Image: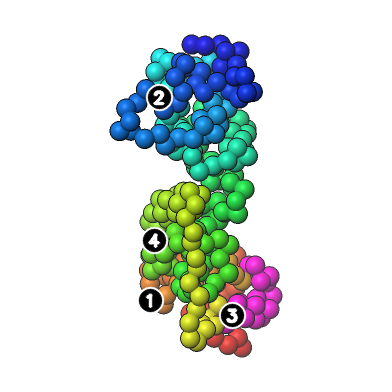
Amino acid sequence: MKTPAEILKKTENGLPQPSWTSKTPIGSESQTSATPEVISLETKAMVNMIFARFMAIYGHKFKSCFETQDEIRIAKREWALSLTSYDESQLVRAVDRCKETLAWMPTVSEFLKILEEVGAGDGIPSVRAAYIEACRFSHDPVGKPWSHPVVYHAGRETGWFALKSEEERTTFGLFRYHYELVCRRFRAGESFDIPQPKGVTDNRDATLYAFIKQWSVSQSITQEQASSLLYYLTKPEGTRVRASLKKQAMEQAARLGIDELPDQVGSVN
């Protein structure tokens, strides 16, 4: 295996060597014409940068991940195919997070998840924040103040009914899957719009907000506490998830000295 000095050796134009495993760049140019080149020179340079930093960060642990030069070459090509839609600043941010949190070099899948977690700098929220937002607006998604169109479209692909009626352990994995796909399409240049409401506006959100605010005053608790306790009111009546959430809320309410919780949105006596 080459030394760090050889890995970091630069070409005449100041960029890292196209590949530090052989003289053939990532995505060998010796491929037949039937296989089109899909990896840009910029992406190849970024993958070289990532692997060089991982070599410096993880040392012998990095070397132990690969037994041969061919394994490194194949790995670099796979990374390049997965990271074509990210720019340098996004990748650097993710590598920094790896250095802070991981004892070993991540897999491609783990690195993509880290890119989501740290935020890619393009306004797209993390998958956890996106999931919470999608659940919050799932009962009436059209016309809501979505933080980003990809959140709406991932929610739609997951299914609004599932998001509002099923438990997180059932829906989060499915949402993550669709969110990753939609984010990749967006970063590849695809445009996403959010449908605008037509006809009469649904004011249930405003009604629920006003009820929670009024109820918090009547119980002498903060509005944040009231929102947490009454979260079950956002789920459809008669569903198992609503009953389960209310049961949990009753346990929390008892610790606050509250004996009863409302069954539905209404006036506060």
Which callout, 3 or 4, points at the residue further toward the start of the chain?
A: 4
- Read off the residue under disc 1: 238
How far is the residue under mark 1 from the one under mark 2? 60 Å
How far is the residue under mark 3 from the one under mark 1? 22 Å
Residue at image coords 45%, 51%: 185
Circle 2 Cα neighbour tier, 10 Å, few/some/many (<14 / 14–19 / ≥20): few
> Is residue 137 one of those drawn in magenta?
no
Q: Choose between 35 and 94: the one closer to the eye.
A: 35
Range of magenta residues: 207-225
Nearer to us: label 4 or label 1: 4
Which callout, 4 or 1, points at the residue further toward the start of the chain?
A: 4
Percent across and percent down for residue 77 are 43, 29
The quarter of the picture where the C terminus appears is bottom right
Percent across and percent down for residue 214 are 65, 81
- Read off the residue under disc 3: 206
How far is the residue under mark 4 from the one under mark 2? 37 Å
In the rendered structure, which amino acid carries the disc numbered 3? Ala
